[in-house]
């Protein structure tokens, strides 16, 4: 029986669905979660990083003047990542790292859920140069890639321009009450749903049989950033949320004014800010209810508070829905199509 861990493993499989690398880059055994950027050290925002403003850029070049690669990078704050691929293979190997105090970059690569190597170097004069090393430092080779395109990620308009498109539901993961957990997720193109609870000190699980109506709903839950940079959340043809574009700040619609009475996930937010660490919080609302629309055989929390966040590194949206009191909460993850 799959429990909550199955979603974690599945997320890794989707996020790092890359082909085998060259034999010179054998895998090690350091397993991490590539969706969580906190797995890598962060540098305080107060650090001055010179000319390295937030950006998204494409590069082409080689490792060891032998292995031709293309690379796509996004820098947000002091985090930098993206992916690269070998020209003769085309599959993506994900990158996730930091800009250090001296402006240098330390960027591990993640292949099939495992740290297999690291790029260390600097960006200057439209080039990213340095050394690629295996994760165990048993081998290293120089790399040199040249910038082929770049776009700013400094403003909200920059971010939403980069995010334009449709993002469809990949998974729902959450908990209800003190000990019940649930996961509904896509695996090899098929929706699966499981739940579990602690009974007599042991966790017992149940597989949920999804109906045709459930599948229709799951397949049509999506986030859309349109050509006007308005942000929408849809369930089929029903618009659950619409956030018209504004040049600054988030769509902050919190009716509770006393921060001591707010849920901690809401209380640290500010209407004038959208960037937090390496993510962009675009919408925060309380007193919401999607119960009539999001009905299904599967478990899902549909009321009270919501936060919509954009993660530029893996180009995903996360919709959190949670109660202000106690324990009921879930996260819906959306991938771009």
Image: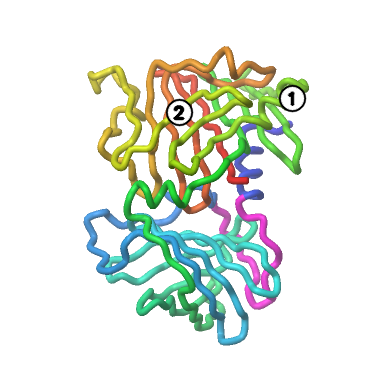
The residue that label 1 is drawn on is 207
Residue 205 drawn at (x, y percent): 69, 24
Q: Are marks 2 and 1 in contact (CB under 8 Å)?
A: no
Q: 55 and 170: which one is in front?
A: 55
> Callout 1: 10 Å neighbours few (<14), some, many (20+)?
some
Residue 109 drawn at (x, y percent): 54, 64
The mark that comes first in sequence, 2 or 1, is: 1
Q: Main secondary structure of the magenta part?
A: loop
Q: Is residue 161 above or below residue 230?
A: below
Residue 20 drawn at (x, y percent): 70, 66
* 58 with respect to 209 (left or right): left
> Callout 2: 10 Å neighbours few (<14), some, many (20+)?
some
- Residue 24 lies in the magenta stretch: yes
Q: 149 and 48: which one is in front?
A: 149
Report the label total. Answer: 2
- Residue 60 lies in the magenta stretch: no
| Residue at figure coordinates x 43%, y 73% from the top left | 120
The residue that label 2 is drawn on is 242
Q: Which residues are magenta?
A: 15-32
């Amino acid at each position: 029986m799959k429990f909550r861990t199955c979603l974690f493993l599945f997320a890794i499989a989707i996020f790092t669905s890359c082909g085998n690398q060259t034999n010179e880059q054998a895998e090690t055994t350091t397993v991490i979660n590539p969706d969580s950027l906190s797995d890598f050290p962060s540098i305080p925002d107060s650090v001055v990083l010179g000319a390295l403003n937030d950006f998204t850029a494409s590069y082409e070049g080689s490792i060891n003047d032998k292995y031709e690669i293309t690379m796509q990078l996004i820098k947000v704050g002091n985090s930098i990542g993206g992916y690269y691929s070998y020209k003769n293979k085309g599959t993506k190997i994900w990158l996730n790292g930091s800009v250090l105090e001296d402006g240098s970059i330390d960027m591990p690569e993640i292949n099939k859920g495992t740290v297999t190597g690291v790029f260390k170097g600097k960006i200057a004069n439209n080039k990213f140069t340095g050394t690629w090393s295996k994760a165990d430092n048993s081998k290293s080779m120089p790399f040199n890639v040249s910038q082929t395109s770049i776009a700013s990620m400094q403003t909200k308009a920059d971010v939403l321009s980069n995010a334009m498109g449709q993002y469809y539901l990949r998974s729902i993961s959450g908990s209800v009450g003190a000990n019940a957990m649930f996961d509904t997720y896509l695996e090899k193109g098929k929706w699966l749903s499981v739940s579990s609870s602690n009974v007599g000190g042991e966790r017992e699980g149940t597989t949920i049989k999804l109906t045709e109506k459930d599948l229709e709903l799951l397949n049509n839950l999506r986030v859309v950033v349109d050509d006007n940079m308005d942000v929408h959340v849809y369930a089929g043809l029903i618009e659950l949320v619409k956030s018209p574009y504004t040049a600054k700040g988030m769509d902050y619609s919190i009716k509770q004014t006393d921060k001591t009475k707010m849920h901690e996930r809401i209380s640290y937010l500010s209407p004038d800010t959208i960037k937090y660490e390496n993510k962009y919080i675009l919408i925060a609302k309380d007193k919401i209810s999607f119960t009539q629309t999001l009905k299904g055989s599967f478990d899902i929390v549909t009321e009270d508070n919501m936060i919509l966040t954009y993660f530029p590194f893996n180009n995903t949206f996360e919709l959190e829905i949670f109660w202000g009191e106690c324990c009921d909460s879930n996260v819906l993850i959306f991938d771009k199509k």
